[in-house]
Image: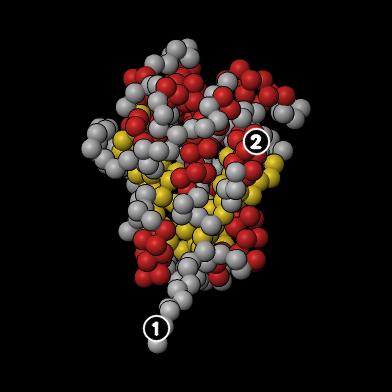
Amino acid sequence: MLWSLHIVSIKLAAVSMIRNECDILELFIRINSRIFDAIYIIDHLSSDGTPLIISELKKAGFPVGYCHLNSSEFNQGEIVTGLVRQLAELNLYDYIMPLDADEFLLVDSKSALEKVLKDSLAGNEFGLIPWKTFCPIADHYYHVESPLYDLFRARTEEPEQYYKVIIGNAYAKNCKVSLGSHSASNEATNCQPLTLPLTLAHVPIRSVNQMINKVILGSHAFRHTSKRVPGQGFHWDLMAKLIREKDFEIAYDDIVEVALRYAVSENSSAQTPSIDIDSARIGLKADSIEFKKLAIVNNLKSFDDFMLNIKP
């Protein structure tokens, strides 16, 4: 008699709070859906093609949950914490991971990720996955078929290493996720996080227009956050300062400089890394943007919509 073995797969959910990420959102969903069983997105006042891109991908069968957030305040930590706890109470997922729209798990397959989690991380624990920042090697994002795969390579090193959390379901039920999802805590347990042998690709700077849009709106959003503490979002302020000093005349060399120094504090003595041209790629050669018109960054429209939503 032949016996068939029933292997129970791990269920994974990603949660993401986004704003004006139309240029990368389609690739974020397409690529991460190979790993995650569901992606839950909170849209914080996007004024670009974000809603329509998600609508099209949902119609195409991608496992995306979507809701709007209309508050002008940027209380990301509290909002992500709330969503993580809600999902944990459903007991549908073994692990929940907060992701930004510019982040991609670099794993060969879901089974490879499952093995790491089964071997390393219990349901009442949380783990840390190190960031690897990717930089543009050219400024023609919309003129190639596979922009992430073709145009981005990793920094040779991370001058200041950051991590993102992945949370076991039991731990998530009473957890608190930090701003940026770089850490988590739980009053019911004092477990220490485990650094997992995985890599999270991070692509914060993609093109001139995208950088201006991201940085200027992001820095203003932090200014409207009533609970902001000193040091939070410091890199937004540094990048906004650079853009203003250049009178918004930003070139390709500028976005490379920003990407190489992204999330490095102004007083850091760390040397600026270079680009590892032979680094791993993000996604597959076949990962193209289908909804290109919706992916175009329109700075004037974004700025106008941002101002209209500011409460007097």
Q: Secondary structure at mark 2?
A: helix
Q: Is residue 247 left or right of residue 256?
A: right
Residue under label 1: 2
Q: From the image, which quarter does the C terminus lie in?
A: top right
Q: Is residue 148 left or right of residue 45?
A: left
Mark nearest the camera among 1 and 2 is: 1
Farthest front residue in view = 1
Q: Is residue 41 visible?
A: no
Q: Position of residue 157 (x, y in %)?
A: 27, 41
Q: From the image, which quarter does the N terminus lie in?
A: bottom left
Q: Which is nearer the eye, 242 or 297?
A: 297
Q: Is residue 117 visible?
A: yes
Q: Which is nearer the eye, 293 or 159?
A: 293
Residue name at image x 53 percent, y 37 percent: 25
Residue name at image x 26 percent, y 40 percent: 279
Q: Which is nearer the eye, 35 or 247?
A: 35
Label 2 amino acid?
Pro
Q: Secondary structure at mark 1?
A: loop
Label 1 amino acid?
Leu
Q: Is residue 289 left or right of residue 273?
A: right
Q: Does residue 216 lie above or below 222 as drawn?
A: above
Residue under label 2: 51
**CA–CA distance between discs 1 and 2?**
50 Å
Q: Residue 65 shows which numbered tag? A: none
User: How many marks on residues?
Assistant: 2
Residue name at image x 52 percent, y 32 percent: 290
Farthest bottom residue in view = 1
Crowd tier of the residue under label 1, counting other residues whose Cα lies within 10 Å: few below 14, some 14–19, many 20 or above: few
Residue name at image x 64 percent, y 34 percent: 52
